[in-house]
Image: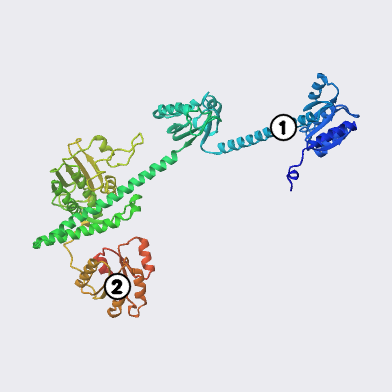
Amino acid sequence: MTPHAANPAPLILNVDDREGPRYVKSRILHRGEYSVIEAATGHSALSLVRQHAPVLVLLAARLPDISGLEVCRLLKADPQTAHTLVLLTSPGLAQSRQRVEALNCGADGYLVEPAEPEEVLSSIQALLRLRGAEDAYHRTSRALHEHEDMFRQVAESLADVVWILDPAEPRLLFASPSLATLCGHKPEQLTQEPRRCLERVAPADRARVEAAFASMLGDGRLDIEFRLARPDGELRDIRARAFPVRGAEGQPGDDRTPPLRIAGTCQDVTLQNRAGRALHDEERRKDQFLAMLAHELRNPLAPLRSAADLLQQLSPSREDMFRARDIIGRQLHHLTRLVDELLDISRFNQGRITLREDLVELRTALNTAVEAVRPTMDACGHTLRLSLPEQPLPVRGDLVRLAQIFSNLLQNAAAYTPAGGQIVVDASLEDGAANTAPDAASGARVTVRVRDNGAGLSEALQRQLFDPLAARDDGTQPEPPRSAIQQDGPGIGLTLVQKLVRLHGGTIRADSPGPGQGSTFTVTLPVEPWQKWHPGSGRTAPHRGVPRRIMVVDDNPDALEAMMMTLQTLGHTVVTAADGPSALARATDARPEVVLLDLGMPAMDGFETARRLRALPEMRGATLVALTGFGQPEDRRRALEAGFDQHLVKPADLDALTRLLDALSADHS
């Protein structure tokens, strides 16, 4: 396709009833590379314009049927042909009146004949250029209106406020309707007085926002966050941002040129800020939990280490050995329960704590707590005095949790008492309790006081002591109370201590004369009726059941040896294996009745080992027990699905292991 075919020449209608002049004008038009059609009358001209839509009509003023002026008027009056250019021609000297009359009829130009060819072509080209400029202007205006309408629809559909400001006046040229909703003023008020938006800015932020607004009028830039009171009084967090729109002479990044316009947004970031604060609080709670976990695990580990050091002496006395044995037993039981509870993170985060309902001699809980904090007391040079009544202190509750309560209170006292301080724990029966027969029916309660001569508490701190995460009226967080930060971590926390005390049906309060004058924490618990109290007579002898052939598989040599010694003491025949392949090799000859199998072994884990053991003919009927540190319900389900008969959590409780072997004997009897 040639360029000429791709862009056809403009079509011009040449109208003249005189054949000679019409021929000359057509030749001139052809020489100017225009396409030409001709007409000799006014009516035929009107018909050809409607039929072919020429870009221009070269129209003679005198025609045989109707005048050229009438043809021009009819063309301009018809919407279908009104856009057609008309160049009116008249022979002879044209008077001003004739020119005015022609232009009034809608003619776009007037030419006196005879005219030079260059004049004719120049006049036509000038009209076509003018029409091209008009068309371009209309296209641009239409596109601008379309874009403006699109921008308006988008801006009005956004939750954020979009605005455009004339900084010279200043006044708003555009603002989405949400601005009026946010500020509570009518749109026309804000358009003329944009500063009225500042009236609802929180008083604490107003001076800062006004200064930022004044600076924005100069450089067009704004990025600020503040609080705004909505018409209903609710405070919302708003982030306002703006950027300059400069004229043609301005260059991007040139702040020296004053902005022609300023465009900006106002975004309600209340929910984002709340989510950010919640995430921050969650991170802080996680850190507190991890610190609490480390601290609570260290509490029983300290007396365990002290007992181990005692046993490692060259010649410990028999009395020391028995004392160390009792400490290890109590603290190991405490540590096992503590790990089980602390690793259940979701229960702590959701505030769901379950208690064991046992009859507890409160002396035992207090002694356990004292043992846990004894290393800390000794390191700080504190003197600890324990004063307990002669009669029993039976309460209904959870021994581990009760020990945690008093261990935490003692840790706090040690941490906030200067070196060489005095700490006293005393207990008493109150509210009508008999001297030797405490009875809950008579309202008997036991009161335990933990007193120190340390840092003390201010009145404000006493009010928020059991709610350290409570926010002040201004929305900020309070300083951590005396129990929130300790030398080795936050401990279980006084908030949780209060929950545990309440779960036991008791109360806790803190008293202090003031800073530097020491503190007293008082815990009051209901006493269990003495008729239900049957304290144990002493340590029972290990239960011996039917001797069994048992294989123990564990990659931890110490765990393997300890379990072997325990089972052999109970009269069982024990075979050990340090990994899965060794277990498979020894199972054929040993033919164990029970296999205690660790799951987390290298090379071949417990699941694969169990599967291969099940495939051995010699292992038919054997009981496979998963012995693992993974104790969640999902871990138990997975072990049972893998073919294990039982699931025990490390460290395995001797009573639980004995019950398992007894149940096996009953099944085979």
State the quadrant of the C terminus. Answer: bottom left
Residue 277 relative to residue 192: left or right: left
Closer-to-camera residue (128/608): 128
Residue 222: x %, y % from top left: 46, 32
Give the SS element for disc 2: strand
Closer-to-camera residue (602/367): 602
Instruction: Give, as a three-letter code, the residue at label 1.
Output: Arg
Give the SS element for disc 1: helix
Q: Residues within 10 Å of mark 1 (few under 14, many from 20)?
A: few
Q: How is the image coloured?
A: rainbow
Residue 329: x %, y % from top left: 19, 60
Residue drawn at x 38%, y 64% is 637
Q: Which residue is mark 2?
A: 595
Residue 251 relative to residue 276: left or right: right
> Which of the 4 image quadrants contains residue 589?
bottom left
Q: Which residue is mark 1?
A: 129
Inter-mark Cα distance, 2 to 1: 101 Å
Closer-to-camera residue (494/158): 158
Instruction: Give, as a three-letter code, the residue at label 2.
Output: Val
Residue 294: x %, y % from top left: 26, 52
Q: Residue furthest right?
A: 64
Q: Is residue 497 above or below residue 111?
A: below
